[in-house]
Image (tube, grey):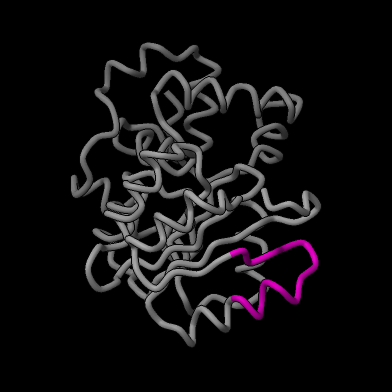
Amino acid sequence: MSDNTDKTSVLLIDDHTLFRSGVRSLLQRNPRFEVVGEAADGVEGVKRALQLQPDVILLDLNMPGMSGVETLQLLLQDRPQAAVLMLTVSEEADDLAAALQAGARGYLIKNIDADYLIRAVERAAAGESVLAEALAGKLFAHVQRGGAKPSAPVSELDKLTPREREILACLARGESNKLIARVLDLAESTVKIHVQNVLRKLGLTSRVQAAVFAVENGLGAGNER
């Protein structure tokens, strides 16, 4: 966090100066955010992240020199729990899958509206995963075609209890903790614990990665076992 613990600190890594300026202005109009730094390339971005320890990092995918995915991998080597949101123009399923499997907390398209970006940063800071709604279908189609490598072998499912498999199936459908709690008649706090257990047992770092794993292993809409 920044020195002001009431604010979420944000680092911007993007090679387009004008775009960074616009995002900085947008976030800093909101009293809940503080943009603590900027970087125009991956190398500088990694250095700034180590210095500033931001709560959320907004990272471009396509930059000269080191790519966004390579930058992401270096960022997570030093801070595995960092909330990194890819913010890019690419809607390619391959780019989306590569970023999520590398550990991105979320994937956003640069043409999203301002309110959506604000909510996405808030959710990432709170530990949630974020995926642009228009990309969910592309991600699951990509996985079902076999375009993504499995996150873990099928036998990993044996580590989960029947209830945890139900939770995982809900994650595959993109359901929130609140909705899962209502569907399964559980307390929302109980759902949160189950989700954490699923991620830990499968060696995953985000709900999006769990959703990918679930689809790869046959858990999804209409298939909870």
Residue at screen point 65% across, 57% down: 9
Instruction: Report the front residue among 174 and 113.
Output: 113
Q: Between residues 103 and 133, which one lies in front from this camera angle?
A: 103
The residue at the far bottom in this view is 18
How many labels were placed on the picture?
A: 0
The relative height of residue 88 versus residue 155 in the rendered view (above or below) is below
**Residue appearing at x 39%, y 68% in the figure:** 60
Against 39, residue 99 (above or below) is above
Point out the stretch of residues depicted in magenta. 24-36
Q: Image quarter for residue 181?
A: top right
Q: Quadrant of residue 222?
A: top left
Q: Nearer the viewer, residue 17 or 224?
A: 17
Quarter of the image where the C terminus is located: top left
In the picture, measured across the screen, residue 65 lies left or right of residue 120, that is: left
Q: Looking at the rendering, which quadrant does residue 177 occupy?
A: top right
Decide if residue 124 is on the left or right side of residue 145.
right
Is 31 magenta? The answer is yes
Q: Is residue 17 left or right of residue 194?
A: left
Residue 190: horizontal and vertical position, in percent? Answer: 70, 22
Which residue is found at the position 49% from the left and 12% from the top? 161
Residue at image position (68%, 40%) is: 179
Q: Report x, y in % for residue 89.
A: 37, 75
Confirm whether the magenta stretch covers residue 174: no
